Amino acid sequence: MRSNVVLIGMPGSGKSTCGVVAAKMLLKNFFDTDLLIQNFEGISLQDIIDKKGIEYFEKAEENAVLSLNIQGTVIATGGSVIYSEKSMNHLKNLGKIIYLHLDYDNMCKRINNLSTRGVVIKQGETLKDMFEERLPLYEKWADVTIDCNNNTVEETAYLIKNAAEN
């Protein structure tokens, strides 16, 4: 059942963008859990957060992830998936967890649509607070860590492919 490759990481790390390219290289399907959440809810991630709140969003994300029963797929997850122990245990059972690491400055450079992107940042917290809170959680769940700071999409996809095959 662990025929999947699960990508976790900060917003902007390339989970969706590099995941599609890696899936092609690995001859696997590609699946984005953010799109599944939007499909279930019928509205954008940002609208879920703005209109229904972060707690609701996190529960919707958990429900979407727990509904996954797929094989042979590269799965791009939302950056906040690591807040749910249930979700992460399910993903760990489905496949190899690859953490796409990005340092804070590079993350900030890559995220230019923070107000519409659907990033879970708790009230009163900064982007830096979110980064520091999530970092140890990504490290905790990762089977493999890939440094994505200075890579092109193709370079990261190739590293994902190598990590998935080893």
Image (tube, rainbow, N blue to C red):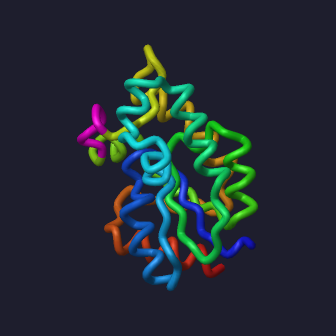
Specify whether residue 124 is painted magenta: no
User: At which x and y percent is residue 150?
Assistant: 35, 60
Residue at figure coordinates x 44%, y 67% from the top left: 19
Q: Is residue 33 left or right of residue 136?
A: left
Is 6 on the left or on the right of 53, as rendered?
Answer: right
**Predominant secondary structure, magenta span:** loop
Q: Nearer the viewer, residue 4 or 151?
A: 4
- Front one among 44 and 88: 44
Along the viewing direction, whichever of 118 and 106 lies nearer the viewer: 118
Q: From what the image shows, is residue 7 above or below residue 30?
A: above
Q: Residue at x 65, y 54 (%)?
A: 67
Q: Is residue 150 above or below residue 5?
A: above
Q: Residue furthest top?
A: 124
Position of residue 138 in the picture relative to residue 118 (left or right): right
Q: Say which quarter of the image contains residue 90.
A: bottom right
Q: Quadrant of the N terminus?
A: bottom right
Q: Locate residue 83, reporting x and y percent.
A: 62, 37
Give the magenta range: 111-116
x and y, in percent, of residue 41 in the image: 46, 41
Above or below for 108 versus 31:
above
Q: Position of residue 142 (x, y in %)?
A: 65, 55
Q: Can you say which quadrant of the picture contains the C terminus?
A: bottom right
Residue depicted at x 44% and y 58%: 15
Instruction: Please give the name of the residue rendered at 58% of the width and 44% of the height, measured from the top-left corner.
Output: 81
